[in-house]
């Protein structure tokens, strides 16, 4: 496995992404987001990725070794943190509904870790080695968005899935640019997990969802351009 990973990092990432989609979609479709079956599946993926990274000592390569220490140098995280709260902009009920809600939140937090490792940790890093940074950013972000088409196979409506694809592409650019500039994947993992987890406890209104999507798509353009213009010394972990 290590030899294949080292010689074919992009194909290694692609195979993991396909496996993730093939396994995840039917379980989500059959049992639902708040199911213990999906929670255990995501926990297995997270554990497998963690063991791989630990056994082969590639934590640093994939941005898992350290949190940015000098907070003042990473104030450019703030727009990302603000956008991460978008699912709560229309409020959220302060009640615990069921164990399904708990399972859903835990599942979403695990999805944040797994998907960031797949699309940023493995795919982006592999593409950067073979295609260069610019192509890696574009391909990683767009692939992340297109990957959400798999939700069609879990019974999600086509129009909602299409909106989700554009929404995910926008976040793909944000997360990839933040990771590229700071060299640490943890802010992206936490941000991704919070967005997904907040979707479980938020009020489900069409207007709020649309505001969040529009703000994310417009914000991602301005934010990505801003991050692209940052000098390396303003962001990279030393």
Image (cartoon, helix red, strand yellow):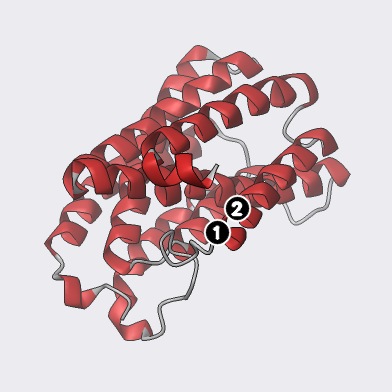
| Front residue (pair 225, 204) | 225
- Whether label 2 touches label 1, CB < 8 Å: yes
The residue that label 1 is drawn on is 56
The residue that label 2 is drawn on is 52
Image quadrant where residue 162 sits: top left
| Front residue (pair 185, 153) | 185
Q: Quadrant of the C terminus?
A: bottom left
Instruction: Specify the farthest residue to the right.
Output: 99
Would residue 58 be found to the left or right of residue 205 on screen? left
- In the rendered image, residue 128, in percent from the top left (x then y), is placed at 26, 48
- In the rendered image, residue 5, in percent from the top left (x then y), is placed at 46, 43
- In the rendered image, residue 126, in percent from the top left (x then y), is placed at 34, 45
Give the Cα distance between marks 2 and 1. 6 Å
Q: Secondary structure at mark 1?
A: loop
Image quadrant where residue 136 sits: top left
Would residue 56 be found to the left or right of residue 145 on screen? right
């Amino acid at each position: 496995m290590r030899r294949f990973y080292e010689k074919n990092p992009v194909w290694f990432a692609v195979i993991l992404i396909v496996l993730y989609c093939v396994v995840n979609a039917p379980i989500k479709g059959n049992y639902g987001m708040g199911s213990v079956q999906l929670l255990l599946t995501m926990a297995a993926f997270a554990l497998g990725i963690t063991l791989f990274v630990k056994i082969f000592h590639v934590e640093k390569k994939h941005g898992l070794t350290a949190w940015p220490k000098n907070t003042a140098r990473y104030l450019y995280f703030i727009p990302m943190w603000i956008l991460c709260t978008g699912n709560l902009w229309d409020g959220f009920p302060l009640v615990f509904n069921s164990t399904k809600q708990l399972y859903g939140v835990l599942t979403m937090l695990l999805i944040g870790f797994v998907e960031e490792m797949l699309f940023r940790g493995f795919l982006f890093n592999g593409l950067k080695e073979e295609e260069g940074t610019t192509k890696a950013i574009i391909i990683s972000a767009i692939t992340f968005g297109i990957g959400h088409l798999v939700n069609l196979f879990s019974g999600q409506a086509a129009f909602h899935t299409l909106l989700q694809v554009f929404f995910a592409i926008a976040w793909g650019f944000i997360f990839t640019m933040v990771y590229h500039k700071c060299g640490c994947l943890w802010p992206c993992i936490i941000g991704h997990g919070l967005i997904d987890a907040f979707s479980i406890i938020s009020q489900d209104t069409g207007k709020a969802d649309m505001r969040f999507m529009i703000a994310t798509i417009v914000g991602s353009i301005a934010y990505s351009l801003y991050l692209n213009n940052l000098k390396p010394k303003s962001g990279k972990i030393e």
